[in-house]
Image: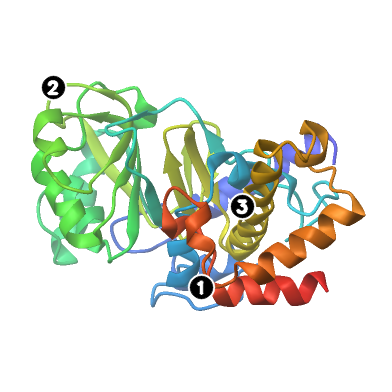
């Protein structure tokens, strides 16, 4: 596709999003449009059409490394934009420019998105009036938080991270945690750092930390496409955020990422043992398994299918017995 056609296509997509007539959020997707713009997801959906990646996949995703998730999403199954797993590779799904409130607390779950823009009085007034008709409260900054479900990750673009006024303080942080039991990704700033840190299990990734309260912006979309840094985020994407950064995983790729990561995790555990024992070279351990090593690896899986947890610092990182048994069958 040449650049002229690409610009025309992008303009048409932006125009399509901008004319969506859904209540008070002109950039929000209706259920039908949510399905239309997430066509590769064939599984369960929320009532609003948002893809609902199974809880088991989300739970297992938490133990996938950022390196593995990014490489698998970026590579897909190869083939470029017109081929590969799920219609192409996904090059723009990793963010490394945000600061975590806690470096050792993983955020993992399904994205629920909120889009804020700089306040414009006439549009803001119309939004607030429609919000009242829809039964929403006066505080637009809480509309998205009120919609969160357990397991969601609140993902917000607040004026493209250019506004110093912070979107989330400890009151809103408590509400996010209460509604979702999960964290948030804010392309903007956070205040009340000390208060938010007291919420056990809660973590937020932000552009920066600022003491000023939320001001001078308006709600413009809920459950809508977002640009976050150089990533297009869709509602229902699986968010994986750790110290190394954030990967936004398209729903139809989530199971593949988990499965391939768990296979790699098992191979690495086996290879590390061989290196420490002096039996494997660095090249062999790093993907150069010989035929004999492959046979030994399969036997190792059989021998340890019931106690694989002992090979991991965190026993939860070990793939399940059922997964290992299926992997053994596949290798045979």
Res 213 → quadrant: top left
| Residue at 78% from the left image edge and 73% from the top image edge | 330
Mark 1 vs 2, N-terminal side:
1
| Mark identifier at residue 304 | none
User: Under tag 2, what secondary structure?
Assistant: loop
Res 191 → quadrant: top left
Q: Quadrant of the N terminus?
A: top right
- In the rendered image, residue 308, in percent from the top left (x then y), is placed at 54, 63
Q: Is there any visible trace of residue 52 in the rendered image? A: no
Q: Which residue is mark 1?
A: 32
**Foreground tag (1 vs 2):** 2
Mark 1 vs 3, N-terminal side:
1
User: Under tag 1, what secondary structure?
Assistant: helix
Q: Is residue 225 left or right of residue 325?
A: left
| Residue at 59% from the left image edge and 68% from the top image edge | 36
- Depth check: give the residue in front, 118 or 307: 307
Q: Quadrant of the C terminus?
A: bottom right
Give neighbour class at mark 2: few <14, some 14-19, many 20+ (Cα, 10 Å): some
Please report contact status of discs 1 and 2: CB closer than 8 Å, yes or no: no
Above/below status of 58 relative to 9: below
- Depth check: give the residue in front, 280 or 188: 280
- In the rendered image, residue 286, in percent from the top left (x then y), is placed at 76, 38
| Residue at 82% from the left image edge and 34% from the top image edge | 283
| Mark identifier at residue 211 | 2
| Mark identifier at residue 265 | 3
């Amino acid at each position: 596709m040449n650049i002229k056609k690409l610009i025309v296509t992008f303009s048409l997509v932006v125009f399509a999003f901008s004319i969506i007539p859904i209540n008070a959020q002109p950039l929000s997707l209706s259920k039908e449009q949510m399905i239309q713009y997430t066509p590769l997801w064939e599984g369960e959906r929320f009532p609003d059409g948002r893809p609902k990646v199974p809880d088991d996949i989300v739970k297992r995703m938490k133990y996938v490394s950022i390196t593995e998730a990014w490489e698998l999403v970026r590579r897909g199954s190869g083939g470029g934009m017109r081929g590969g797993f799920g219609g192409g590779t996904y090059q723009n799904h990793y963010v490394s420019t945000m600061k975590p409130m806690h470096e050792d607390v993983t955020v993992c779950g399904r994205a629920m998105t909120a889009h804020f823009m700089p306040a414009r009085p006439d549009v803001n007034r119309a939004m607030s009036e429609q919000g009242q008709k829809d039964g929403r409260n006066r505080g637009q900054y809480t509309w998205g938080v009120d919609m969160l479900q357990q397991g969601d990750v609140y993902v917000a673009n607040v004026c493209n991270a250019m506004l110093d006024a912070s979107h989330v303080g400890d009151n809103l942080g408590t509400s996010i945690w209460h509604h979702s039991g999960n964290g948030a990704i804010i392309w903007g700033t956070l205040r009340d750092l000390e208060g938010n840190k007291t919420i056990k299990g809660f973590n937020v990734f932000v552009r920066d930390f600022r003491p000023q309260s939320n001001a001078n912006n308006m709600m413009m979309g809920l459950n809508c496409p977002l640009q976050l840094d150089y990533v297009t985020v869709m509602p229902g994407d699986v968010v994986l955020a750790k110290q190394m950064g954030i990967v936004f995983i398209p729903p139809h790729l989530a199971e593949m990422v988990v499965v391939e990561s768990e296979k790699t995790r098992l191979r690495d555990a086996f290879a590390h043992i061989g290196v420490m024992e002096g039996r494997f070279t660095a090249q062999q351990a790093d993907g150069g398994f010989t035929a004999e090593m492959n046979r030994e690896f399969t036997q190792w899986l059989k021998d340890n299918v019931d106690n694989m947890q002992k090979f991991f610092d965190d026993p939860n990182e070990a793939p399940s017995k059922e997964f290992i048994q299926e992997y053994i069958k596949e290798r045979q």
